[in-house]
Image (tube, rainbow, N blue to C red):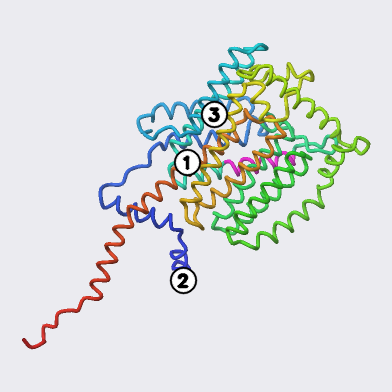
Amino acid sequence: MGSLTHQSQSVPAEESQATSTSGVAAQRGPSRRRPLGGVFAALVLFMIIYFARPEDWIPGFSTAPLAKIAGILVLLALIFSLRQIQQRLPRESLFVALLVGQLFLSSALSPVWRGGAFQLTLNFAKVFMVILVVGAAVTTIGRLRTLIFAQALSVAAIAAVAIWKGRLVLGRLEGILGGNYADPNDLALSIIISLPLCLAVLFLSKRWLSKILWSISLLVMAYAVLLTGSRGGFLALVVVAAVCLWEFAIRGRRPYLLGLAILAGLILWQSVGGIVVGRFKGTLNESDDTSASYGSAQARQQLFWRSVEVTKEHPLFGVGPGNFDQVSGQWHTTHNSLTLMSSEGGLPALVLYVLILFSGFKNLRTIKRLAPRLTKSRLLAGALFASLAGYAVGSVFLSVAYSFFPYILVAYTTALLSIARKSAAQARELDPARQKTLRKQRYLQTAEPENILSPV
């Protein structure tokens, strides 16, 4: 009985507001089913398939085009539910639509290979449908938490599978997984941007068993990142760890996290930190290079300046998506997402790409202003901020501008901002009614009762 009382007193403000609002709605009329349920179910399925990629590591799944099937389900569910979508298109979704349009123009005007550029753009254009569905179907904290849980669990499984089935090449973890996880640098970044989401799920878990399992998942994921020996990934990991400690340990008043983070960091560094140290030493000293990092660093520097030259030569539309490697002189892409966009899509594509990321950070800043402390919205906002910060750092060293990861993160911020605004609006609507009730209660308490026995 005491535990129930304690739980009822510790319910966050936004949950109590939601409960009060649901009570008011129940008094006004019959309850309604949550809209876009089919769309959301298809979206969860798509997220699991996209992030976990079971066709790459589960026998028998490789023959089925699971990602295409999930994408078709999302599209059909969205088409049949268009009448229920009434909100305006958020600015970040508009920026993505404009970016897709710019890349199609770049493909059509490409001086290199129009067919390949068009095919890459067509595959990338699917992300607009995904973020549109996220913004329309994710209307509650529960739904957003489900999506984040699906992503965190999927990437944690990928990290474990990469360690289990992967192999070390020149001292680095080289995953055997295909698609987004074929390259160790891409694998590292995908794990890093999901680490804060796993931490948020850990904090939201109520059972100790779940907390223990998520803690182990965090250690496995960090171990996999260090095992890849990715230099850009390591810098992104440092940024993510610093932001998480600031958001959750200092501002979130969880000082014990500082001690746990230091202990985990020391253990991981003693285990696999030598791989990262060797990579950084080889970057600066050719004679001390044991993992071909010096040659890689020199090649990346040349590719970067070549991408700047290509941007100057084709400033408006670039050479078309996926075509930089053909004009690079080395048959490699530029390891920088910013110059990747500018050289292949033109300066307008670069501007739109930066605006999309900036919109995500701006959404999170607004959410932190609207959401009270110690609420689910505030916690998820802190996790998403750490993920976006990690991506922003890691993408400077990788060509990941065409992956869905950053745009899905921004879509999460769009959904969370809409939820936070609704919660704040509901709180403002309920305040006058509460004030009226309190005034009435105070009046009844202070008013002197009529004494019927007093003499006339």
Q: Is residue 442 magenta?
A: no
Which residue is rendered at x = 55% and y = 43% of the image? 148
Q: Quadrant of residue 455?
A: bottom left
Which residue is rendered at x = 39% and y = 35% of the image? 87
In the picture, measured across the screen, residue 396 lies left or right of residue 453, that is: right
Q: Quadrant of the N terminus?
A: bottom left
Q: Secondary structure at mark 3?
A: helix
Q: Secondary structure at mark 2?
A: helix
Extreme left residue here? 456
N-term-proximal mark, 1 vs 2: 2
Give the extent of the magenta segment. 151-164
Q: Residues within 10 Å of mark 2 (few under 14, many from 20)?
A: few
Q: Which mark is residue 2?
A: 2
Residue 171, given in percent of the width and then of the height, sits at 84, 39
Give the spatial CA distance, label 3 vs label 1.
16 Å
Q: Which residue is mark 3?
A: 127
Residue 133, given in percent of the width and then of the height, sits at 47, 33
Give the mark toward the camera: 1 or 2: 1
171 or 177: which is nearer to us? Answer: 171
Give the spatial CA distance, label 3 vs label 2.
48 Å
Q: Amino acid at mark 1?
A: Ala
Asked if disc 3 and disc 1 are in contact, CB closer than 8 Å, the reply is no
Q: Which residue is mark 1?
A: 415
